[in-house]
Amino acid sequence: MNSGSEINAYTFDADLEAMVEQFFAEKSGTEVVAQAEIDGLPSELWNAAVELGLPLVGLPESVGGSGGSLLDAVTVQRAAARHAAPLPLAETYLAGRLAAAAGLPVPSGIATVAPGSQRDDARRIGDGHVSGTFHDVPWGSAASVLAAVLGDRVVLLDISDAEIGSGTDFAGQPRQSLTFTEARTVDGDNPVDARILSRLGAFLRSVQMAGAMESVSTLTRRYVSERVQFGRPIAQFQAVQQHIVTLAQMASMSTLAVDRTAHALTRRDADFEVCATKLVVSQNALASVRAAHQAHGAIGMTREYRLQQLTRRLHAWRSEFGDDIALATQLGSAVATRPSLPRLITDPQPTLELKS
């Protein structure tokens, strides 16, 4: 018989979901998100999240995490994305996962990861040192620690040793290059699968997109019910109703895909599910953005309105840890060698290996 902790590892915690939903609903309003695009990380919001242990939910307490399961981490990340929280929660969690896999303590404070750009030229210089540039690092200017995978090892770097470039993503969140010159590293003793970063990164972006799409759907449905034109709510027009149906479909499909993949990841690497989910969710995000902005019209892009904060994040997350072309190529190349596509799709535990 499974213990309570074993059961909890495979179920979503309704109490946790209610708590984090209320937290972000109260703390991550439209003005907070808009101001973060000007000032950077909102320290008050981050500190409040830290007090609750949210950045490290899903990481074992034995290595410095807050405890809980992967499904608990999904709950936190999805709720934050629903409210466009301008915080490096996914990045800090991902850095912690890399550190733990390598046998290192989870970094304290704000951490981020080197996502593995093809333009990166960072390399080891002797033992315990790294030189070179990591590109497109999310929240690089706000974090204190960078986790990177070089070969089959995880290295932790002090970002105060880096020359930090300037830049933001489409949502106005920091995305910078970090250049190190013979910077000292903390190296993990345990070798890691190089795909761990792309796998978890793609999954977390899928989680975030699913959460944002839920809010986009809810926000649009409320708007068209309240907006009156030609003497009646625009929700009564057939063209608008089609947009609402599309948004509900895309959000529901994405949430189901993420939940299935989350359960698969609690048991195995689930490369096939992660890759397929990221591709499906990314395509759903594009359809959601189009439908929502067509239903809203010009108001959807105003700074004071929540929609554009969500849809710009969807655009940014779609391209990270695998864009549509890369993901489709990976899946197509791998599936082409299998004797039966229907059997692969219906297999509850596919053993498809994807190349990084």
Image (cartoon, grey):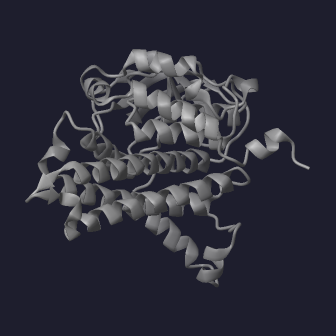
- Residue drawn at x 18%, y 50% is 227
Q: Which residue in the rendered view is the most extreme toward the bottom?
A: 339
Count up the numbered dots.
Answer: 0
Q: Is residue 195 left or right of residue 79?
A: right
The answer to which of 250 and 154 lies nearer the viewer is 250
Residue 338 x, y percent position in the rendering: 63, 79
- Along the line of sight, which residue is nearer the eye, 193 or 351? 351
- Residue 75 placement (x, y as % from top left): 57, 41
Place residue 50 in its image quadrant.
top right
Asked if residue 334 lies left or right of residue 315, the reply is: right
> Is residue 272 placed above or below 139 in the rendered structure?
below
**Which of the 4 image quadrants contains residue 176?**
top left
Q: Is there any visible trace of residue 49 in the rendered image?
A: yes
Residue 133 point in image, percent of width and height = 40, 32
The part of the image, by quadrant, that contains residue 153 is top right
206 displayed left or right of 71: left
Residue drawn at 48 percent across, 16 percent down: 47
Horizontal side of 302 relative to 338 (left or right) equals left
Picture residue at 87% right of the left edge, 47% below the top: 2
Which corner quadrant holds the C terminus? bottom right
- Which residue corresponds to the image point at 69% horizontal and 22% vertical from the top-left? 64
> In this view, which residue lies farthest toward the left?
230
- Can residue 118 be seen in this snapshot? no
Vertical arrangement, residue 204 with respect to residue 97, above or below: below
Where residue 108 appears, x then y in whole percent?
59, 18
